[in-house]
Image: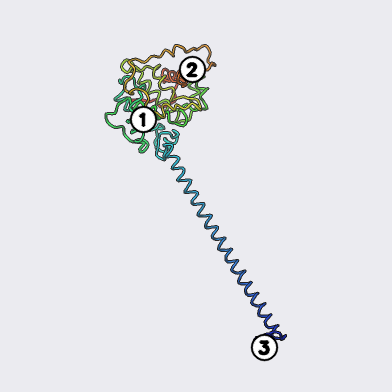
């Protein structure tokens, strides 16, 4: 039987028919293979697009999550006022008064309840209280101060807010120019007009508050000279010399004695070292701990208080009851 089948296949007609069938089968198989390959490529292409879309969405989501984490790690969130540019804070308020609400509330409280407090703006305040206040205003920038709060803590909160600004009220750009204008009321007035509106208005507001505090110096022991020494580091500083001491003291354990144990009387012997003979000389004198005293900045702040109304002539003068 095997031989007969083999003999049948050897016949020309039969062999030709078999070859035709094999060719047809091969062609059909090739067509199916190419069709399957094409469909596979299409699926792979579609799958690739979907994968890319998913990857893009995942990357965007990851960036959002990462920015949230970074913001959280830096202590800055979308509702924060500490560590945020002052113009951003004022813009969020949607208020006609271009001054951060936190400063207005603190100043109003001090005017009504704290002007007679000894060493106002010199005391560092209670660490836990400051932490609570920072948290309060980072959640609600329009919050009211707790009743009965110590004026020392309120004044310290003002210093903390100013110190956490990414750029001082006087800006980095005008640092040298403002210091150079400190001996002339006219020059200082013209120089400050170059500040952004929010910076200018807030600087006028803060120095007006300090002036009011100095007017009660017989009771609070803080005249313009002593206030300038305390406030200069958070109002005017050079780029790269951020007042970290003020920024961090409410988050790092205190290494010194109780903040309420103030010295009986402040001394300013270093002030006697000032010289008006050569303004070009570097007026930053380092302390033993490496922190420089910027005497030029101190003189600027004292000038802004002592000649406040003559310098801020075009500002809406801050008036308290």
Q: x, y percentage for residue 219?
A: 30, 17
The residues bearing labels 3 and 2 have C-alpha atoms spaced at a distance of 117 Å
x 47%, y 13%: residue: 274
Q: Is residue 242 visible?
A: yes
Quarter location, residue 93:
top left
Picture disc at residue 4: 3
x 70%, y 83%: residue: 15
Looking at the rendered structure, the secondary structure element under dot 1 is helix
Quarter location, residue 43:
bottom right
Q: x, y percentage for residue 119?
A: 34, 19
Picture disc at residue 306: none
Pick whichever, 208 or 172, lies toward us: 172
**Residue at image mark 1:** 104
Looking at the rendered structure, the secondary structure element under dot 3 is helix
- The reply to whether the C-beta atoms of the residues labelled 2 and 1 are less than 8 Å apart is no
For marks 3 and 2 on the same chain, the one whose residue lies earlier in the sequence: 3
Q: How is the image coloured?
A: rainbow
**Residue at image mark 2:** 285
- Residue 277 shown left or right of residue 231 in the figure: right
Q: x, y percentage for residue 147?
A: 27, 31
């Amino acid at each position: 039987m095997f031989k007969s089948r083999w003999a049948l296949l050897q016949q020309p007609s039969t062999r030709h028919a078999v070859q035709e069938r094999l060719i047809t089968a091969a062609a059909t198989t090739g067509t199916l293979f190419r069709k399957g390959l094409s469909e596979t490529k299409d699926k792979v292409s579609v799958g690739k697009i979907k994968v890319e879309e998913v990857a893009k969405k995942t990357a965007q989501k990851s960036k959002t999550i990462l920015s949230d984490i970074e913001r959280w790690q830096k202590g800055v969130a979308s509702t924060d006022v500490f560590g945020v540019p002052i113009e951003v804070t004022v813009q969020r308020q949607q208020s006609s008064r271009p001054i951060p609400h936190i400063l207005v509330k603190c100043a109003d409280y001090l005017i009504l309840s704290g002007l007679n407090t000894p060493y106002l703006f010199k005391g560092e305040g209670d660490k836990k209280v400051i932490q609570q206040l920072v948290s309060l205003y980072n959640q609600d920038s329009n919050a009211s101060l707790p009743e009965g709060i110590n004026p020392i803590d309120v004044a310290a909160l003002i210093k903390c807010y100013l110190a956490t600004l990414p750029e001082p009220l006087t800006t980095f750009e005008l640092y040298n120019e403002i210091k150079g204008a400190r001996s002339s009321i006219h020059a200082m007035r013209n120089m400050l007009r170059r500040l952004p509106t929010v910076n200018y208005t807030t600087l006028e507001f803060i120095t007006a508050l300090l002036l009011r505090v100095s007017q009660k110096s017989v009771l609070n022991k803080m005249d313009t000279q002593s206030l300038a020494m305390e406030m200069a580091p958070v109002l005017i500083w050079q780029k790269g010399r951020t007042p970290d001491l003020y920024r961090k003291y409410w988050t790092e354990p205190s290494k010194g004695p109780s903040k309420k144990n103030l010295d009986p009387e402040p001394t300013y012997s270093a002030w006697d070292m000032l010289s008006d003979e050569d303004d070009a000389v570097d007026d930053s004198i380092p302390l033993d701990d490496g922190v420089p005293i910027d005497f030029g900045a101190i003189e600027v702040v004292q000038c802004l208080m002592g000649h406040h109304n003559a310098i801020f002539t075009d500002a809406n003068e801050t008036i308290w009851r």
